[in-house]
Amino acid sequence: MTGKKKKQNIAAQVRSVTENTIIDMGFILWDVNFYKEGAEFILEISIDKKGGVSIDDCSKITKAIAPLIDGLDPIDHSYSLVVSSAGYERELRLPSHIHYAIENSLPVKFKLYAAFEGKKEYCGIIKDYNNDNISLIIENESIIIVPKKQVSKITATACE
């Protein structure tokens, strides 16, 4: 298994073992990432809830899920567990993230691999999403339909 696939597999395992606990505590499990930063390995779990996430919330979640992760033992070397708020600006990587953005009318920034209709970046509100395309309402209230395969990154962020 390649390094990237192994890291994704660790993140998927951790998601599956922690998600119900996080939901039962009244939070949304936004994302799980496992990565190396310098010499240190980081297992980062991003959470969200209505009204925002406090440091105390992160501490409570850490205490609740650390034993679950230890029991799973998916990582064969030392690492740091970081539980944090997904934050106002957050990457939308999963279909559930995009549906969340649609349901909450979040402004998003699209970065594209190649120019689409003359631009490589768009800002607006996602109107619709399917396997092939994402519809985006842009600043002048027009709708553009961007092929999903052309999108390199979507971030929930304030549009300027």
Image (cartoon, rainbow, N blue to C red):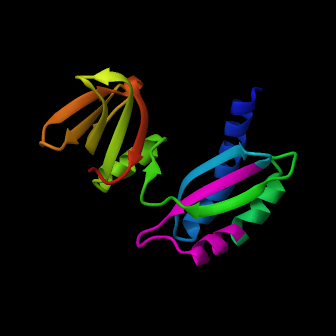
Residue displayed at 28% across by 23% down? 116
Task: Tell me residue 22's x, y (percent).
Answer: 60, 64
- Rendered residue at 17%/44% (across/down): 139
**Which of the 4 image quarters holds residue 47?**
bottom right
Relative to 121, 7 lies left or right? right
Q: Is residue 48 magenta?
A: yes
| In-image side of 97 versus 69 (left or right) | left
Q: Which of the 4 quarters of the picture holds residue 155? A: top left
Farthest residue in the bottom direction? 56
Residue 122 rendering spot, x and y as whole percentages: 28, 37
Q: Is residue 73 magenta?
A: no
Q: Is residue 102 left or right of residue 8?
A: left
Please state, as top left, top right, bottom left or bottom right, where the N terminus lies in the image: top right
Instruction: Left or right? Give the position of 71 relative to 52.
Output: right
Looking at the image, residue 107 lies above or below residue 113: below
Residue range highlighted in magenta: 41-62
Residue, x 64% and y 50% (percent of image)? 15
- Residue 58 at what x, y percent from top left? 61, 70
- On screen, 112 above or below 74? above
Residue 28: tell me if it is visible. no
Which residue occupies the extreme right position in the image? 77
In this rendered view, identify the residue nearer to me: 148 or 157: 157
Who's the residue at 66% across and 58% down the image?
18
Question: Which percent across, then down, holds residue 134?
Answer: 31, 33
Front residue of 95 and 43: 43
Picture mark count: 0
Q: Would residue 32 be seen by someone viewing this image from the given angle?
A: yes
